[in-house]
Image (tube, rainbow, N blue to C red):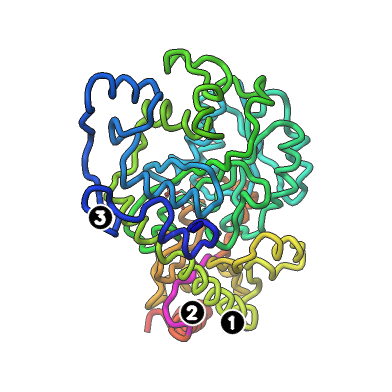
């Protein structure tokens, strides 16, 4: 039976059924650093990649393996690599194919931390990031040259919440030989980027996948569809002998394992050298989260839609930002990509242009948490301009979709009446400073 066909089943049954030594049904936490080799021949074969098996937990671990297989199944990919944070996933996804003198082309609609990584830290590594407006997919083509190694974007960019034109940009990438890497953190289950032509998917598991706000982690999923050999000149790191791995050519060495050159190289070189390993304890939490992810996403989407509708009809609200609600966004695109719902994030702007009104809204919340996070079971709120996007210039904030009055909600799975009641009383307080003091 194929356990990978439907997401609800894939997250429960793919990749692991029972522990081979104890028959335990829950995935055990293999809290070990290392693994006994059967003999020196076994060790030699493992290090030479002639046989796949456990060597050291920085590079692989059975708990992580079960999670990686489930994530690959959920996404319709061929393999995955679990890492210590969403930021680690993004960083490794780029460093795996780009080095000094190379560039990537990225959409401007990015999480603030990714913006900083791209605009500043990657620059110190000699990697240029060319930011383009994704509302015209052709901007990716225009910014491409012979040193372009990847296109990067968020499926549902937070906080802009305008769905990315996946197949349009992936098609340009296929033509020019550039893979599309998508951060799908805000839209697991509701969008499967590989179905639309994306090549690599990254996640911050810290958000919806873990879902309970208790662990930081990330994952890179390889779709296995990009032809690295066809574009060998663009990807020397995958097609030329790697001196760090006794001269292995990754596209050749991994052939017997399937189209996994990209993810195997990331594991065997970058994870080995940079050590962004995910603790199996955190992985266990992600496996628990994953089991109910499809169920939770349905509830997040239903509650968020109700919140968006409520805000759209509220007299104190100037604008609601939610997929499908903007006249400037092609509706056809929203429907084509967000097949399982519109997501759990809702942005809005108050009519009151007093810069303190947003702060009063946040400070008046009673149930909803004021935290720098999304994708929790609980409803969360934040004012990005003064928090997650504070380190960006005013101009860069606008490019990522953050206006001074923007408020973001990550709508949880509480009873919708309680969510709306808290938002309603905080809106009243935003209009009246005295109400907060009372
Ligand atoms: N990608 C997106 C869309 C995010 O919202 C975040 C964090 O907020 C990250 C990546 C980074 O993830 P992490 O905090 O797990 O490093």
Q: Residue 159 in the image: state x and y as whole percent.
A: 57, 58
Quarter of the image for residue 306 reads bottom right
Residue holding disc 1: 310
The kind of secondary structure element at disc 3 is: loop
Is residue 365 part of the magenta span, yes or no?
no
Q: Residues within 10 Å of mark 1 (few under 14, many from 20)?
A: some
Q: At 33% from the left edge and 50% from the top edge, which residue is drawn?
A: 283
Is residue 411 part of the magenta span, yes or no?
yes
Mark 1 or mark 2: name the one nearer the start of the chain: 1
Residue holding disc 3: 23
In the image, the segment drawn in magenta is 407-416
Vertical comparison of 316 with 381: above or below: below
Q: At 71% from the left edge and 31% from the top edge, which residue is drawn?
A: 177
The kind of secondary structure element at disc 2 is: helix
Pick the residue in front: 151 or 393. Answer: 151
Residue holding disc 2: 423
The answer to whether one can see residue 18 in this image is yes
Q: Are marks 1 and 2 in contact (CB under 8 Å)?
A: yes
């Amino acid at each position: 039976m194929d356990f990978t066909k439907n997401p609800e089943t894939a997250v429960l049954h793919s990749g692991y059924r029972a522990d081979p030594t104890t028959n335990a049904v829950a995935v055990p936490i293999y809290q070990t650093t290392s693994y006994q080799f059967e003999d020196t021949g076994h060790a030699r074969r493992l290090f030479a990649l002639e046989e796949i098996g456990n060597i050291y937990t920085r590079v692989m671990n059975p708990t992580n393996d079960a999670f990686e297989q489930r994530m690959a199944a959920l996404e319709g990919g061929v393999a995955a690599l679990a890492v210590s944070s969403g930021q680690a996933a993004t960083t490794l996804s780029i460093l795996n194919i780009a080095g000094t003198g190379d560039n990537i082309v990225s959409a401007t609609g990015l999480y603030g931390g990714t913006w900083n990584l791209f605009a500043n830290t990657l620059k110190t590594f000699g990697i240029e990031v060319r930011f383009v407006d994704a509302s015209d997919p052709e901007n990716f083509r225009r910014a491409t040259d012979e040193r372009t190694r990847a296109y990067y974007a968020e499926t549902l960019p937070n906080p802009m919440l305008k769905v990315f034109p996946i197949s349009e940009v992936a098609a340009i990438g296929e033509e020019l030989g550039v893979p599309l890497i998508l951060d799908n953190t805000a839209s697991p289950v509701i969008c499967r980027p590989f179905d639309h032509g994306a090549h690599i998917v990254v996640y911050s598991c810290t958000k919806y996948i873990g879902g309970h706000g208790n662990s930081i982690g990330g994952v890179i999923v390889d779709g296995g569809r990009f032809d690295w050999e066809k574009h060998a000149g663009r990807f020397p790191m995958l097609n030329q002998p790697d001196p760090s791995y006794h001269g292995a050519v990754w596209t050749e060495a991994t052939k017997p394992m399937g189209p996994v050159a990209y993810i195997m190289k990331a594991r065997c070189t970058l994870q080995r050298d940079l050590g962004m390993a995910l603790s199996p304890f955190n992985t266990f939490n992600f496996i628990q989260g994953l089991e109910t992810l499809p169920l939770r996403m349905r509830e997040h989407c239903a509650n968020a839609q109700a919140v968006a509708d409520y805000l759209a009809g509220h007299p104190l609200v100037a604008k609601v930002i939610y997929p499908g609600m903007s006249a400037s966004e092609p509706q056809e695109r929203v429907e084509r990509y967000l097949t399982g719902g519109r997501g759990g994030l809702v942005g809005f702007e108050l009519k009151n242009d007093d810069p303190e009104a947003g702060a009063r809204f946040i400070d008046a919340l009673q149930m909803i948490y004021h935290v720098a996070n999304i994708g929790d079971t609980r409803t969360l709120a934040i004012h990005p301009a003064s928090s997650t996007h504070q380190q960006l210039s005013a101009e860069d904030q606008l490019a990522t979709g953050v206006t001074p009055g923007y408020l973001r909600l990550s709508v949880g799975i509480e009873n919708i009446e309680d969510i709306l009641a808290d938002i309603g009383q905080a809106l009243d307080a935003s209009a009246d400073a005295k109400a907060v003091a009372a």
